[in-house]
Amino acid sequence: MEAAIAVRGAPARWRLGGPLWLVVPALVLLATAFIGPILMLLSRSVLDPDLTLRHYILIFSTPAYLRVIWISVEIALVSTAVCLAAGYPTAYVLSHTRGALRAALLGLVLLPFWTNILVRVYAWIIVLQSRGAINLLLMDELGLIDHPLKLVFNYTGAIIGMVHYLLPPTILILDSTMRSVDQRLVLAAESLGATPRRAFFRVFLPLTLPGIRAAAVLIFIMGLGFFITPALLGGRQELTMAMLINHEFTELINWGFGSALAVVLLSLTLAGLYAYYRLQRKMGTPARGGLHG
Amino acid sequence: MKLRQSFNRVARGAALAVAMAILPSAPALAQSKTVVFAGWGGSIQKAQREVFFNSFEKETGIKVIDVPDVQLAKLQAMVDTGNTQWDVVQALGMWIPQGAKANLWEKLDFGVIKKEGIPPSLVDAWSIGNSTYGMVLAYNTKAVKGHPPTSWRSLWDTKGIPGARGMFDGPRYTLEAALLADGVAPDKLYPLDVDRAFKSLDKIKDQVAVWWKQWPQVPVLLASQELTMSLTSNTRINSVRKTENAPVDLSWNQSLMTVDFLAVPRGAKNRDNAMKLVQWMNDPKRQAELAKLTGIGPGNTDALQYLSDEQKSELASYHYQKGEMVLFDNAWWAENEQAMTQRWNQWKLQ
């Protein structure tokens, strides 16, 4: 709690000037090497070569492209939900351990982060395919099923791959929020007669809500931009915006249309961020947690 | 005021530093003892280094800088900004007409480059065919249980030869296979009857287990019997068959021959050296050496005389000569790929 108060007090001092100048080099670099080029690229979506809206009209008048937008959003939403459901208990355990055990658990969470994404994807194919490790275990070793489960090259495969990628950041965000919760509040609730279950749901969970919201938004935004994972682990129907954009730019050299798709994706991302800040304000909690602290 | 002046000075200094870092130094340009080759990278480029570049450097004293990940989009960006960094480009067949339309190529110097041995369909003003591949029907020999597939019709015949099918997730090659399977004569394949192709694809749409996107996926899936048969490229199948002894084989009948061309981008800084390197890579003996190392067919068919029957039988150029293959039509695809991709995406999401 002390840490949170200190952070909240900080902006007052910043407004006096001085330290703010320290971010100028970073801003200049971002503006010239990132924001400028991106704006130039995105302007191609309406200037190809003259002012035109035809790329946007094509996107919003073609059912297939609308479907791709929806598929991208849906896959990102489902992955986020699975990540939160799987990440919350893990982060709970992680935030309640100390010392060597915590370091070891943290290492396990971070391990996939250090592995190349293509290596991970091909490893998942080996594990999930019809003669893969999981199906062989269920069929030959345990005899639970007669026919192999279809775990890859479809919706299931795409979600498994994406959750694997997005789970570590989810856990890290939730962990940082949970560690900033004052455990004495939970103890106080229990000493006043609350069962551990009640203390969790009435005290601990509400205190971690900002972290859950931060994780949800960040993971959803990351999930919107995926293309390798759904391309290789998904099936015919798992076509995302990022896959289309990649194809338009590198294969078809159709930069105008590719830029228009990128603008739509960027708008969805910004809409997600806007929703997050609105939500944080409405809930009466200043935006903090994983995204900021 | 003072602050702004000093800021301007800093800004100018920074701009100069950036410019110096980006621009090549003048002496290097004047001598032009280098040539930059852009190719696919990986094992292919390693073999090209061994067969072409090392000997070229020794013979001419011109250093070959070979860079990977050649892409038409990158080339377009370079030419558009007047900063062409590549001198010789290994180009996917379609890039030649696409690039010609966008004025990305220099004319080849046929005083330096010899056309002998190159089939007329593989050479034009901007490019010369250098390597050939087959888009073939490959299969797992155990999974087909004594009924090896003989044409694209076998891929559609899911009752006759049961088992999981694989298809390239894109209209290229797939539309051709669909038409050939539907009975279109190979010499009447182009221009493609697109409606008929999609109707033919409808018949196996739901039987296809994997719509793959990356070439390395297919040999793995065939070798592990995740797939029974699939469209794929001949070089990868031959390499897993030989190096890993995997139970896979392929049918050349009705397969498509695709060709990689060599071309010189507009504004290439070492244009003369580029022409020399193209001719060096055009040499039949050296192309035969590359074929032995990689299984990539020679663009120059004179190369075949330096190879044994067994070596030849693995090369697309040889099967094309025998009349078993159809030449992939780069011009048709350059004209139609955008429309086809759009239709493909609509079709596959339905």
Image: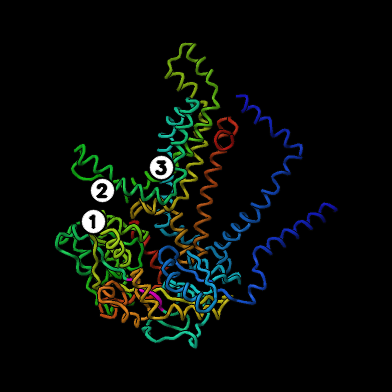
Q: Residue at x 56, y 79 (%)?
A: B271
Q: Residue at x 72, y 41 (%)?
A: A20
Look at mark 3 in the image and give the residue it sits on: A164
Look at mark 1 in the image and give the residue it sits on: B164
Q: Residue at x 33, y 53 (%)?
A: A235
Look at mark 2 in the image and give the residue it sits on: A130
Q: Residues within 10 Å of mark 1 (few under 14, many from 20)?
A: some
The answer to whether mark 3 and mark 2 are in CB contact below 8 A is no
* Residue B349 location, quadrant: bottom left
- Image location (x, y in percent) of residue B37: 50, 71
The answer to whether mark 3 and mark 1 are in CB contact below 8 A is no
Local SS, label 2: loop
Please tell me which residue lies in front, B200 or B247.
Answer: B247
Per the image, is B130 magenta? Answer: yes
Q: Residue at x 25, y 71 (%)?
A: B252
Q: Chain of mark 3?
A: A
Please tell me which residue lies in front, A230 or A46.
Answer: A230
* Residue A1 location, quadrant: top right
- Image location (x, y in percent) of residue A223: 46, 46
Please tell me which residue lies in front, B123 or B299.
Answer: B299
- Residue B196 against residue A18 in the figure, above or below: below
Amino acid at the residue labelled 3: His
Check chain identity for marks 3 and 1: say if they share one. no
- Image location (x, y in percent) of residue B297: 34, 74
- Residue numbers of the magenta segment: B129-133
Q: Chain of mark 1?
A: B
Amino acid at the residue labelled 2: Ser
Q: Chain of mark 2?
A: A
Answer left or right for A252 relative to B236: right
Check chain identity for marks 3 and 2: say if they share one. yes
* Cα distance between the residues tagged 3 and 1: 27 Å
- Image location (x, y in percent) of residue B111: 49, 88
